[in-house]
């Protein structure tokens, strides 16, 4: 037996990484999880997103939170970074995508997906505690009213979410013993409907991964190395295909210098660092350490064809923050899905990134039109203008609309030297521009604002920089029939290597049109089902090895 530090090292602790950690420890493997982010508890979570150093993630400038924004020439990507991955800051929404997505992209035909996936979705739902939203707030009622007025009221639905609501009729916020895992999980509190899910739940109601998959994996013996960044993965013993396993090199993720350098060895490595994190690491490894990674790396990166828009109701008596982060949704056509989204009262930071909704053709003419609209609004009603764009009370008076489409479209990621620093390489986007906004969604928001006395808003970067915003970056290390069409095979194994896997959003092969967390979870469950138990489970090795040693003597 080769002496490894771990049977499996998992890079990242989001949905793919946490699922892998639990299922592998259940099989009897010795598992280490390396996570770049911090561990969060109700005691250290920020109360609002104005507490920038504890909300945003960019250690180079002293920001050590869990929410990261990354700007590319084609898109702005927002994502989470923590023990528990994006589950700490995601909006709890766990939806099954339409069946037709399995017929699209590079994963089409690799399995009988429509027959296989329902069982894995069912397991994922049970583990994540998926239930219909039971707290519809003013934002949800407003979305339903607007949908009825615009002829799509029949499509309105409360979202399926990973939130614990407690027993029917009980007071909100009370404590219950573990309601999900027969006492093996942590005690929980029922949701109070504060809308704070995306700033991190401080009330123990959100079903984050550190309360289910990762919690149970750690109980099974998985070791989590938080605030640790992987900088290199090399095949052991110069085996070109990694047949003898890997050595993994790490540094402290919170410092500018490469301090606390460590080396681990593992028989197997799973990349689960989210789409951008996994692509970034694999690109750097492909240059030297793991050169056989497919040239398909970075290709067909998708954004769910997303757009973020909003409607603000200055002076509203209704508190649009009440409820859960994403409480309801509608379909305005067969391809376009809109969800009512909110931040908790006082979390007004993103008011600094919204402006008046503007149509027109993307480019400089749209900027001119936007300037003219802003000037016209200011002249026609200075008081209303300042009410519309002041940060104060933004979260309480604003409904954010997350718009997603299943329409095919993608860009590519490349690994290049940036113009501002010739000594490093970074991810850069290339390809056709992604649509900056979705006209039918903008029309919906404008009509809603006119009907209910609101002001429609867009994200400023969509107008000034002509780039959309997405919270769901997917693909880049997708499945394929061979290395000519994908980075991994249908069982999540990296082409060109043994014992190397990818289990995160980078594996996705199509625009889902819904929030991808449930699909990532279900696909990770499927991937782990292909890995057989070890010949000698971890808990028995300590009994067997001394016997082997004594016989050898």
Image (cartoon, grey):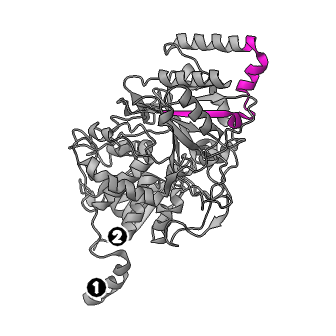
Decide which of tag 2 and tag 1 comes sooner along the chain: 2
Q: Which quadrant, please, contains the N terminus?
A: bottom left
Point out residue 174 in the picture as x, y percentages from the top left corner.
67, 63
Residue 495 appears anywhere in the view: no
The part of the image, by quadrant, that contains residue 391 is top right
At horizontal 57% and vertical 29% (from top left) the residue drawn is 146
Point out residue 66 in the picture as x, y percentages from the top left corner.
58, 48
Point out residue 497 in the picture as x, y percentages from the top left corner.
25, 52
Q: Regarding mark 1 in the picture, which secondary structure is present there?
A: helix
Q: Is residue 398 left or right of residue 246?
A: right
At horizontal 29% and vertical 71% (from top left) the residue drawn is 534
Residues under numbered marks 2 and 1 in contact, where contact means CB atoms less than 8 Å apart: no
Q: Nearer the viewer, residue 540 or 414?
A: 540
Q: Nearer the viewer, residue 243 or 80?
A: 80
Q: CA distance from mark 2 to mark 1?
A: 23 Å
In this view, the mark in front (2 or 1): 2
Q: Based on the picture, tell me whether residue 533 belongs to the magenta stretch.
A: no
Mark 2: few/some/many CA within 10 Å (<14, 14-19, 20+): some
Q: Which residues are magenta?
A: 378-403
Which mark, residue 27?
2
Which mark, residue 548?
1
Q: Is residue 535 left or right of residue 143?
A: left
């Amino acid at each position: 037996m080769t002496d490894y530090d771990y049977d499996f090292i998992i890079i990242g602790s989001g949905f793919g990484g946490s699922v892998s950690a639990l299922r592998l420890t259940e099989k009897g493997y010795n598992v280490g999880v390396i996570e770049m982010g911090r561990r969060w508890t109700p005691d250290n979570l920020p109360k609002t997103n104005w507490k920038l150093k504890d909300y945003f993630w960019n250690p180079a400038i002293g920001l050590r939170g869990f929410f990261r924004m990354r700007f590319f020439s084609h898109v702005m990507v927002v994502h989470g970074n923590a023990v528990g991955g994006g589950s700490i800051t995601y909006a709890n929404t766990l939806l099954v995508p339409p069946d037709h997505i399995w017929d699209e992209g590079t994963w089409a035909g690799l399995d009988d997906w429509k027959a296989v996936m329902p069982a894995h979705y069912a397991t994922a739902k049970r583990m994540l505690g998926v239930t219909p939203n039971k707290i519809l707030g003013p934002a949800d009622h407003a979305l339903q009213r607007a949908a009825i007025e615009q002829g799509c009221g029949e499509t309105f639905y409360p979202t399926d979410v990973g939130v614990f609501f407690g027993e029917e009729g009980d007071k909100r916020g009370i404590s219950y013993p573990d309601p999900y895992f027969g006492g093996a999980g942590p005690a929980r509190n029922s949701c109070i409907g504060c809308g704070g899910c995306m700033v991190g739940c401080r009330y123990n109601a959100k079903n984050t991964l550190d309360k289910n998959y990762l919690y149970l994996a750690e109980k099974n013996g998985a070791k989590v190395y938080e605030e640790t960044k992987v900088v290199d993965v090399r095949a052991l013993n110069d085996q070109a295909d990694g047949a003898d396993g890997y050595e993994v090199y790490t540094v402290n993720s919170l410092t500018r210098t490469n301090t606390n350098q460590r080396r681990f060895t593992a028989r197997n490595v799973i990349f689960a660092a989210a789409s951008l994190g996994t692509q970034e690491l694999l690109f750097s490894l492909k240059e030297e350490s793991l050169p056989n990674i497919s040239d398909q790396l970075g290709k067909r990166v998708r954004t769910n064809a997303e757009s973020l828009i909003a409607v603000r109701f200055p002076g509203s008596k209704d508190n649009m923050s009440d409820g859960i982060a994403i409480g309801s949704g509608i379909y305005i056509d067969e391809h376009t899905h809109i969800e009512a989204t909110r931040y908790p009262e006082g979390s007004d930071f993103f008011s600094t990134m919204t402006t008046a909704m503007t149509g027109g053709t993307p480019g400089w003419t749209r900027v001119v039109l936007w300037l003219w609209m802003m000037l016209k609004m200011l002249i026609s009603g200075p008081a209303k203008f300042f009410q519309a764009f002041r940060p104060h009370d933004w979260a309480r008076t604003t409904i954010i609309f997350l718009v997603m489409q299943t329409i095919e479209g993608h860009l590519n990621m490349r690994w290049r030297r940036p113009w501002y620093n010739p000594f490093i390489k970074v991810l850069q986007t290339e390809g056709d521009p992604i649509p900056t906004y979705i006209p039918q969604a903008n029309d919906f928001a404008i009509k809603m604002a006119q009907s209910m006395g609101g002001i429609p808003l867009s994200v400023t970067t969509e107008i000034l920089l002509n780039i959309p915003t997405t919270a769901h970056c997917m693909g880049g290390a997708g499945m394929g029939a061979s290395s000519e069409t994908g980075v991994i095979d249908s069982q999540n194994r990296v082409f060109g290597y043994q014992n190397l896997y990818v289990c995160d959003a980078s594996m996705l092969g199509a625009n889902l049109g819904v929030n991808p967390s449930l699909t990532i979870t279900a696909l990770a469950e499927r991937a782990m089902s292909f890995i057989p138990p070890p010949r000698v489970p971890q808990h028995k090795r300590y009994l067997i090895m001394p016997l082997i040693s004594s016989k050898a003597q």
